Amino acid sequence: MAIFLTLQHVDGLRLRQQVAATVERVKGTETSDGMVVGAKEWHFEKKPGTREDVEVEQDRDKRNPDKLLGTYSPSISFGLKNLVVERKGAVTNIDFRNSSVRNIMRIKTQVLAPVGKKDKEGKDIKAWTDQNTIYLPPNQWGGFAVGEGLRIILDEMPT
């Protein structure tokens, strides 16, 4: 199953989809055999032949393809695709609806925070850290703040 979303355009909004990749690793020391552990890693979709991230484009009018409608229509699927919502500039609220019939949407809020290390120039190194996770029931509206140093990741949870 998948959840189809409709998001309104806001200046500075950036939507990128991540795809899951199954990874097997050996955990243990160099002297022991260790244990093979399977996991999923999330990677941003890339354009073929380049290393640029693919951003979700605005919907276009079917009668006039040059006209943008001011909405985005991405989809998310459990274990296959999720959606990262970011915004450059001041923090603002983004509203959306879980249009699914029975599946719950997981919303992870992340903050860009210093990790306690410094680079060669003496500047703090920052990384995205999880803050809280909220579960949005089917057919419900949700709104979350995104902006400078604050983003959300939308994912589907099967029932």
Image: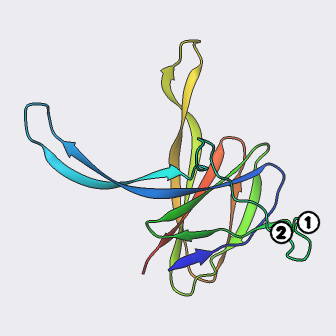
**Outermost residue, top direction?**
121
Which residue is under mark 2? 60
Between 80 and 28, the one lying in front of the other is 80
- Count how many numbered circles sit on residues in the image: 2
The disc label shown at residue 108, or none: none
Which residue is under mark 1? 67
Number of residues whose C-alpha sits closer than 10 Å to that of mark 1, classed few (under 14), some (14–19) or many (20 or more): few
Amino acid carrying label 1: it is Lys
**Regarding mark 1 in the picture, which secondary structure is present there?**
loop
In terms of image quadrants, where is residue 56? Answer: bottom right
**Outermost residue, bottom direction?**
101
Question: Which residue is pictured at 62% across the width and 77% down the height?
Answer: 98
The quarter of the rendered structure image containing the C terminus is bottom left
Q: Position of residue 120 (x, y in %)?
A: 54, 12
Between 63 and 139, the one lying in front of the other is 63
In the picture, measured across the screen, residue 45 lies left or right of residue 71, that is left
Measure the C-alpha gap from mark 1 to mark 2: 6 Å
In the picture, measured across the screen, residue 85 lies left or right of residue 105, that is right
On screen, residue 84 above or below 125: below
Asked whether the residues under the numbered discs 1 and 2 touch, taking CB atoms below 8 Å apart as contact, a structural biologist would say: yes
